[in-house]
Amino acid sequence: MFATVAEDFPTALAELHHCIDRCAAEGVAELPDAALAEDLVELRRAEDRLEAEFARRLAVFDRRKGCRLDGAITTANWLRHRCKFSTTAAAERVAMARHLAELPETAHAFAQGEIGYDHARVITRAAESIGDNAMRDAEHILVEAARQLHPQQLQVAADHLRHYLAPANVLEEAKDEHERRAIYISPLMDGIFRIDGHLDREGAACLQTALEALLGPRTADETRTPAQRRADALVELARQGMAATGGRPHVPVIGRSTALRRSASAPGAGRIPGGPVPGAPTPRICAG
């Protein structure tokens, strides 16, 4: 379905590859930290500039429906097969390229390396919500903010702008976010459970606030990772929820009473819906 085209880079791209080869040939082990730091900053800026050029060319390719050259139906589909993007990343690149073509200030700052890829993504997503026409009058506000702010901070500014310029659209987006809420609890082959899901902003804020209240400040002798602390807090939140209900639901444990009182080395002292548990956790489950 997809044609294989021999590599034939224009002069500028040939020179670009030559420069990359020169960088790759440099010895870096002996470079001082200060020099490495400067190199990393410059490489990051160069990567952002390349992303901007990729978007500029992609916008033209998309407008001409160049994907048909290889038999692809959409530009995103072409990116997935020819550039090895994931489905989500391909769709994101196409959307960004289309909006950047209508946002000259953003495109220019991106091309000069004054703002990064994540900044450009925040601005183009705001344009998608507000509309390119309405965004043009406010574009300079976000571009200037992007030059000074971290992408997460820029997102806050973009959200405020969206609420001001397109409140009806923001409300619809909030409804859509709420409809996408879901929690999945999936058993794995080794008996561990995996939790995945989506929460809207309100739900996520409630959960984060509750977990942080249970976490408390980190102590000097704390050995758990942040992720482990959140997992423990989530389980504790569930325990407190069970204890607070009138009927007080319990986790069912099946096992002989003598086995339930045995040591941690006791094999399969009890069984819960997820499978057998050793002796040590079983009394804790029964007591919880």
Image (spheres, rainbow, N blue to C red):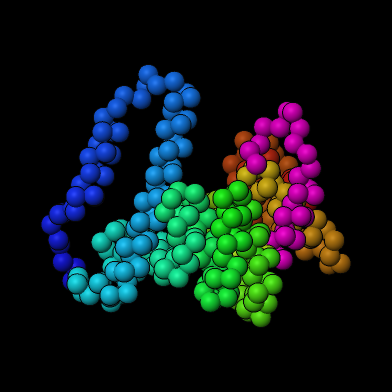
Q: Assess whether residue 212 is covered by the magenta stretch.
A: yes
* Above/below status of 118 relative to 160: above
Residue drawn at 67 percent across, 52 percent down: 255
- Depth check: give the residue in front, 65 or 171: 65
- Depth check: give the residue in front, 254 or 109: 109
Q: Which residues are magenta?
A: 202-226
Which SS type dominates the magenta stretch? Answer: helix
- Depth check: give the residue in front, 85 or 226: 85
Residue 57 placement, left or right of 122: left
Task: Tell me, yes or no, if residue 50 can be seen here.
Answer: yes
Examine the image and state in which quarter residue 193 appears: bottom right
Residue drawn at 47 percent across, 30 percent down: 37
- Residue 154: x %, y % from top left: 61, 56
Residue drawn at 26 percent across, 30 percent down: 25
- Depth check: give the residue in front, 283 or 78: 78
- Residue 246: x %, y % from top left: 86, 67
Q: Assess whether residue 140 is covered by the magenta stretch.
A: no
Location of the N terminus by quadrant is bottom left
- Residue 27: x %, y % from top left: 31, 24
Examine the image and state in which quarter residue 136 appears: bottom right
Residue 139 placement, left or right of 8: right
Residue 247 placement, left or right of 2: right
Examine the image and state in which quarter residue 15 appears: top left
Marker count (numbered): 0
Task: Tell me, yes or no, if residue 181 can be seen here.
Answer: no
- Residue 130: x %, y % from top left: 58, 74
- Please, which residue is most extreme toward the left here? 6
Residue drawn at 16 percent across, 66 percent down: 3
